[in-house]
Structures are given as C-alpha cells and as structure tokens.
Amino acid sequence: MEIKRIEEFKLNSNQHLQINQLLQLCFSAYPTDRTFYKQIPSFRYLVFEKKAIVAHLAIIHRMIKIGGKNYIIFGVSDLCVHPDFQHKKIASVLLENLEKLGRKHKIDFITLIAQEVDFYKKNGYEVFNNDCRWLIVNETQSLGIAQRNLDNALMVKPLGDKKWVKETVDFLGNLF
C-alpha cells in the first residue's frame, strides 16, 4: 500500500472517479455527482493498493475563531476505508500522517464532526460541547447561518501548546 497527499487541484479524472466510488460505498447518502459533501477540500490523503484507491481522507485548511481569537486548523472530512481493507489501522495511519503534517507547519488544531466518536478518542481526539456558528450549505447553495451546540460530535486534537476553550466556535464557513 502507498499513501499519497495530493492537493485537490492536482487530482486527475480517474482519481475523482475512484474517490466518488469509494465515498458512495462507504457513505450511503453521499452525493453521486461529486467528490465532496459541502465544499471542495484543500487536499486529500489517498491510500493506493496497486492503482486502486482503498482509503480516503479530505482536509479543509482554514482559520476559525473561538471567542475573540483566531486559530488555524485542519478540518477532517470523509475519512473512509474500503470494506475489504478495514480493521488494518489504515484510518489511524492517515490521521497520524495529518497530525505530523500539522505539527510541522504549526497548525493549531485538527477538528472534525464525528459519528464514530470512540474511534477518534482512541486516536487522541477529545469531545467538546462548544456552541458553534457556521454557514449552512445544502446542495452547493448557501442558506444562512446556524448557531447551536453540536451535541457531543465536535472533536478536537491540539497540535501545539494552544488550549481549546469553552467559547463560541465560529467556523467562518461551512461544517466539514
């Protein structure tokens, strides 16, 4: 197996097709006509077995605001592994690669909205219950601004010495 980090604009049509097929397989309600859910990611980690993509992690690189302070984050999106390759710690290795990259480039936090909370806890992420504000995007259309608590789904891993605080998180864009 080979892991590659690829900027979004460098993906070729075959890679987009394979990513779409993998996302369709792993997420039942995933849009059929694209390789992102709400917004195009900044880059992706892809795992190849020969020439086939068997695992995927999309990353949104951006600034958020917590209370009155700005932080730079990697937002995790669409982490998935083909069913034939699950339970081999591939997803954990992808998260480790992202963490190393973030530490190297002084990213403050990795954040995500989780359904599989236990998996992320095993990988060093912590649940936070901040009130959050974000842009509501549905089918590539902005609908407004939401503000509420994400009910034990917001997970964070600090990459430096900055501490996550219990103030309102403004995602300064859509959720990932």
Image (cartoon, grey):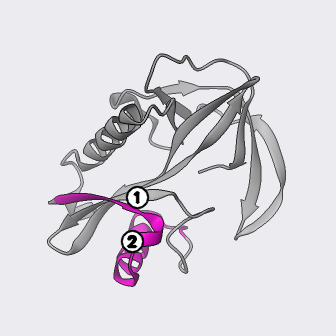
Q: Secondary structure at mark 2?
A: helix
Q: Nearer the viewer, residue 44 or 87?
A: 44
Q: Which residue is pictured at 51% across the width and 57% down the height?
A: 42
Q: Nearer the viewer, residue 89 or 49?
A: 49
Upstream in sequence: badge 2 or badge 1: 2
| Residue beneath disc 2 | 19
Q: CA distance from mark 2 to mark 1?
A: 10 Å
Q: Which residue is pictured at 64% across the width and 26% down the height?
A: 129
Residue at far front of view: 105
What x and y, as percent, mark residue 13? Answer: 40, 83
Q: Residues within 10 Å of mark 1 (few under 14, many from 20)?
A: many
Q: Secondary structure at mark 1?
A: strand
Q: In the rendered view, tell whether residue 20 sits above or below residue 1.
A: below
Q: Which residues are magenta?
A: 2-30
Q: Residues within 10 Å of mark 2 (few under 14, many from 20)?
A: many
Asked whether 9 falls inside the magenta stretch, the response is yes
Q: In the rendered view, tell whether residue 109 sits above or below residue 176.
A: above
Label for residue 121?
none
Residue at far bottom of view: 13
Q: Quadrant of the N terminus?
A: bottom left
Q: Would you say the residues marked 2 and 1 are in contact, meaning their CB atoms lie under 8 Å apart?
A: yes
Q: Which residue is pictured at 52% across the width and 33% down the height?
A: 155
| Residue beneath disc 1 | 44
Q: Quick check: 76 left or right of 121? A: right
What x and y, as percent, mark residue 40? Answer: 57, 64
Q: What's under tag 2, amino acid-wise?
A: Ile
Q: In the rendered view, tell whether residue 62 sits above or below residue 123.
A: below
What x and y, as percent, mark residue 4? Answer: 27, 59
The reply to whether residue 67 is visible in this rendering is yes
What x and y, as percent, mark residue 12? Answer: 38, 79
Q: Which residue is pictured at 53% across the width and 27% down the height?
A: 127
Q: What's under tag 1, amino acid-wise?
A: Arg
